[in-house]
Amino acid sequence: MIKVDNKTKTISINRGDDNIGFNFSIPIDDTTNYTFQVEDIIKFGVYNKNGLNDKAVILKTITNDEEKEVISIELTKEDTTIGDIENKPITYWYEIQLNDDTIIGYDEKGAKQFIVYPEGSDEQW
């Protein structure tokens, strides 16, 4: 499961999910999005809460290979198996950069949250 709340920019996943992703675009105005250029570098980083200056727990770097308005950020099971197994949601912070400029991240509304819900049971039914 992955859920992206476009209003609050909150991303929610289940720990250990595989082959999930979301699309990312940069609105310029109400009708136009930025066109990603060939060789644009997009970074998606997830950090421990209050740890934006620490090493990322997930870091995806994408080098764009064609002009387009939407970038897909894909996460694997290895990416989403972060932190300890908990029986409660764990909140991380995230940011997205374009060519080293932060596009989505901590701002006047606070940190952008990346919430990891507990993974499902391995118990056979």
Image (cartoon, rainbow, N blue to C red):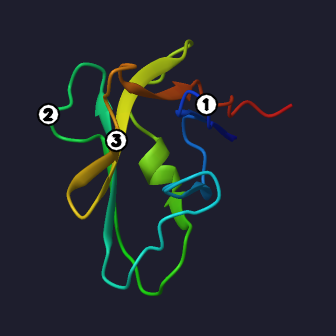
Q: Residues within 10 Å of mark 2 (few under 14, many from 20)?
A: few
Split into 4 quadrants, where in the image is the C terminus? top right
In the figure, is residue 117 to the left or right of 39? right
State which tag comes first along the sequence, 2 or 3. Answer: 2
Q: Which residue is farthest left?
A: 53
User: Tag 1, which secondary structure?
Assistant: loop
Q: Nearer the viewer, residue 35 or 14?
A: 35
State which tag comes first along the sequence, 3 or 1. Answer: 1
Task: Give the amino acid at mark 3.
Answer: Glu
Task: Give the amino acid at mark 1.
Answer: Lys
The correct choice, above or below, for 48 with respect to 105 in the image is above
Task: Give the amino acid at mark 2.
Answer: Asp
- Residue 7 is tagged as 1
- Residue 95 is tagged as 3
Q: Position of residue 35 (x, y in %)?
A: 48, 73
Q: Residue at x 73, y 30 (%)?
A: 123
Gap between marks 2 and 3 measured at Cα? 13 Å
Name the residue carrying label 2.
54
Q: Nearer the viewer, residue 101 or 79?
A: 101
The correct choice, above or below, for 79 with respect to 108 in the image is below
Q: How many numbered marks does the figure carry?
A: 3
